């Protein structure tokens, strides 16, 4: 009885590890989608309101779609301490390690010297290019999720079964 419970537990752990890896891929896709939507809204607000970057971040932080996003929350905190967009973006990126894992932080660093410093047209062009790069990154991650998400789940189940067979 105890051996069966142990084997069942090992099978569950192996399966859970596979599903956890697949979930990490899905979370990366979701994070990139949220960031892409945020910068799209940031661009709309910048063009329409012509407000400071800090005011736009505070405005967007109140929206339900962005209230839990790590980057938006950390940007809002950073703008509470100062108004230098480049420094605040760098600080926010350093507090969100998952953005580096996704390959997004390097893309966003291109905004540091532009937003709030250059003319509106240059800011719009830069935001367009950042959104294009984020879209390409999103497509890569979606392909990775399609390709490896099911594989991780199946490998977890098969690994669990292999351990069960070895232990029986």
Image (spheres, rainbow, N blue to C red):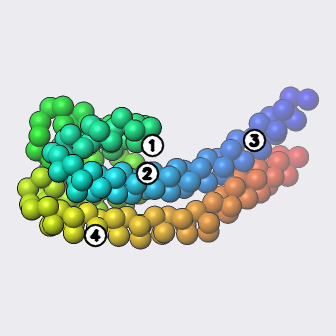
How far across and down, in percent of the image, does residue 153 sit? 69, 55
Q: Which residue is mark 4?
A: 129
Q: Foreground: 36 or 45? A: 45
Label 1 close to label 4 by CB (< 8 Å): no
Mark pair 1, 4: CA separation: 23 Å
Q: Secondary structure at mark 2?
A: helix
N-terminal label among 1 and 3: 3
Q: Is the residue 43 above or below the residue 85 in the image?
A: below
Q: Which residue is mark 1?
A: 65
Looking at the image, is mark 4 or mark 3 nearer the viewer? 4
Left or right: 155 as drawn, with respect to 120: right
- Residue at the image position 45 percent from the left and 56 percent from the top: 33
Looking at the image, is mark 1 or mark 2 nearer the viewer? 1
Number of labelled discs? Answer: 4
Assess disc 4: are there few (<14), some (14-19) or many (≥20) residues with their C-alpha within 10 Å of its C-alpha: some
Looking at the image, is mark 3 or mark 2 nearer the viewer? 2
N-terminal label among 2 and 4: 2
Label 1 close to label 3 by CB (< 8 Å): no
Looking at the image, is mark 1 or mark 3 nearer the viewer? 1
- Residue at the image position 43 percent from the left and 56 percent from the top: 32
User: Residue 12's mark?
Assistant: 3
User: Residue 34's mark?
Assistant: 2
N-terminal label among 1 and 4: 1
Kindly give the residue lying farthest to the top in the view shown.
Answer: 2
């Amino acid at each position: 009885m105890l051996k069966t419970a142990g084997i069942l537990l090992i099978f569950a752990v192996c399966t859970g590890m596979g599903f956890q890896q697949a979930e990490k891929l899905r979370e990366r896709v979701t994070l990139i989608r949220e960031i892409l939507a945020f910068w799209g809204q940031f661009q709309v607000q910048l063009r329409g309101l012509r407000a400071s970057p800090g005011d736009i971040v505070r405005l967007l932080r109140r929206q339900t779609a962005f209230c839990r996003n790590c980057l938006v929350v950390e940007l809002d905190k950073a703008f509470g301490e100062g108004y230098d967009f480049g420094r605040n973006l760098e600080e926010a990126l350093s507090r969100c390690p998952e953005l580096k894992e996704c390959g997004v932080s390097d893309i966003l660093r291109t905004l540091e010297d532009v937003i709030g410093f250059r003319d509106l047209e240059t800011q719009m062009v830069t935001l367009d290019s950042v959104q294009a790069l984020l879209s390409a990154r999103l497509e890569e991650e979606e392909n990775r999720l399609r390709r490896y998400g099911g594989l991780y789940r199946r490998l977890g189940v098969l690994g669990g079964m292999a351990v069960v067979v070895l232990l029986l």
